[in-house]
Image (spheres, grey):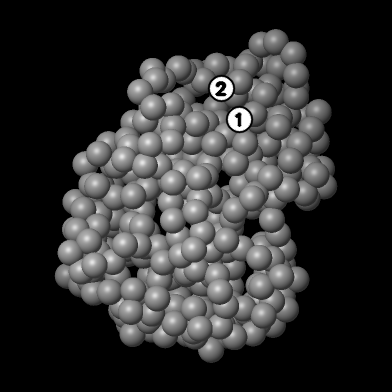
Amino acid sequence: MNENSLYHNTTVGDTTIKGNIFLAPMAGFTDVPFRSLCIDEGADLTFTEMVSAEGLSRDGEKTMDLMKRAQNEQHYAIQLFMGSPEPLEKALERLLPYNPTLIDINCGCPVPKVTKTGAGSSIMRNPEMITKMVRLIVETVSIPVSVKFRTGWDADSENFLAFAQAALDGGASLLTLHARTKAQGYAPFAHWEKLTELKNYCVSHGYQVPVFGSGDLFTASDAKKMLEQTGIDGVMFARGAIGNPFIFVQTKELLAGQDLKPISLERKKAIILKHLDLMIIHYGEKSACMQMRKHACSYLKGLPGIGPIKQAFVKATSKQDYCQALEMLGGTC
């Protein structure tokens, strides 16, 4: 791996991660089965779903389950969300036994039920808060801290550089910018030029922390363009990985100068069943089959004539139901 190439190792605090193509945290998607699948398909680091620091401080069983590590996750990050530093001390006590590589603070979620509590992107309206949160973690545990944030609350209050400085003041070891405001949500288009501004700011002020980018990364080509155009240190795939865990290895192949090969239908069918098997192991068949519906439909997005198959997925309650649906594509399960 050439450290001068677009694909290279990432140093976070005292830890070196082999690669710079990460899976971003996504509520409802980056559970143990999906993270395990993405690791097998080339993700260099994976992030849990959002974990409530308040829930952790209260020993919430469901909250604790979100922090479980997949068997093949040598490195993984736990993402916390909270509206104040108060629950952090107890939350960190509950978190430590899981030994994450990284603790990430969510300052980017635009969902109202999160922002109304003062968490997620609401923190961007109070940069002093992120300094306190990061510092408390850094002073309490030896695990490096990253911060994922947006360009601002809205177009009239873009403060991502000041917010980045506030995170760095607390001792953050990695910054990830989703290049949209909270008000934009996930609407097009992400402003990648802001990533360049952030990277240049860090370099000009003497900070050697990695800067990662997120937003409008739906193909390997998108990732290559972002790295080339912005000068940042790595990328985090979010929605682009849903139904497409192949995006990690494809990105590595593209960055290595290889031609991209289309993913065959047989490969997609095989990965759907592998994903389902991982979910059955983790959740049990009934729950897994219900949760798999959203994933299965995403895998076949864009293929012609798949309406009946999607309808079958939505009604599936067993692995056999999924096999029968996939047989509509031809071949055997």
Q: Residues within 10 Å of mark 2 (few under 14, many from 20)?
A: some
Verify CB contact (< 8 Å) between mark 1 and mark 2.
yes
Query: x and y percent of residue 139 in the render?
Result: 51, 83
Q: Amino acid at mark 2?
A: Ile
SS assignment at label 2 = loop
Displayed quadrant of residue 61: bottom right
Residue 47, image x and y in percent?
A: 55, 55
Q: Is residue 222 left or right of residue 264?
A: left
Q: Can residue 159 be seen by looking at this rendering?
A: yes
For disc 2, the marked residue is: 306
Badge 1 density bin: few <14, some 14–19, many ≥20, Cα 10 Å: many
Q: Amino acid at mark 1?
A: Lys
The answer to whether 275 appears left or right of 114 in the picture is right
Q: Nearer the viewer, residue 213 or 121?
A: 213
Q: Residue at x 42, y 85 (%)?
A: 132
Q: In which image quadrant can residue 257 be found?
A: top left
Alpha carbons under labels 1 and 2: distance apart: 6 Å
Residue located farthest toward the bottom when viewing the structure as drawn: 86
In this view, the residue in front, 291 or 18, is: 18
Q: Position of residue 89 (x, y in %)?
A: 59, 86
Say if residue 104 shows up in the picture. Answer: no
Return the mark for residue 27.
Answer: none
